[in-house]
Amino acid sequence: MKYVIMVSHGEFAPGLHSAVRMMTGNREDVLSTSLKEDMSADQFAENFKELVKDINADDQIILLADILSGSPFTNALNVLSDKGMLDNTLIIAGMNMPLAITAVLMKDNFDDLAALKEVLLSEGRMGLTDFVVEANDEDEDL
């Protein structure tokens, strides 16, 4: 099985997970956890370890993190390394909604994690858009 796991500081990962669930439905292969304000990095690592305890060594993980090298990112990698799962893990930092939805909906369409990575990075980048509103002097309403 392929899992999408989101990790973050604060409530970003659980919030993004909730938003993704609205678009994709409730799925057992999508998980999230976060480093909360009053939590130590060790507590986060224990929570992450509990989150992934039932994932088997032959399963694959798409790990989405809020920021490269942050505590959730590094502690999640350490736990996955201890489980011997890094070789089966696609790791992306800088998650956003288009990236997460595409990961959930498209992950099972790819056997090659490298090909999936390119699709996910492309979707994440395309999700960042400069929207310009042009003023029209004739219309006062937008």
Image: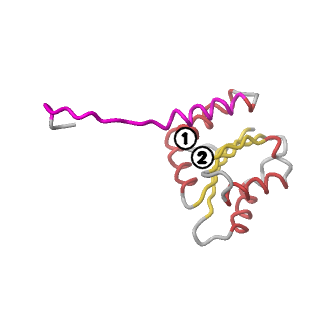
Q: Amino acid at mark 1?
A: Gly
Vertical arrangement, residue 93 with respect to residue 141, above or below: below
Q: Nearer the viewer, residue 109 or 40?
A: 40
Q: Nearer the viewer, mark 1 or mark 2?
A: 2
- Could you tell me which quadrant the N terminus lies in? top right
Mark 2 surroundings within 10 Å by alpha-carbon count, few (fewer than 14), some (14 through 19), many (20 or more):
some
The x and y percentages for residue 31 are: 65, 49
- Look at mark 2 in the image and give the residue it sits on: 94
Q: Is residue 12 left or right of residue 85?
A: left
- Secondary structure of the residue carrying tag 2 is loop
Q: Is residue 62 left or right of residue 67?
A: right
Q: Residue at x 42, y 36 (%)?
A: 130
Q: Residue at x 64, y 45 (%)?
A: 30
Mark 1 surroundings within 10 Å by alpha-carbon count, few (fewer than 14), some (14 through 19), many (20 or more):
few
- Look at mark 1 in the image and give the residue it sits on: 25
The x and y percentages for residue 125 are: 55, 35
Q: Is residue 31 left or right of residue 79?
A: left
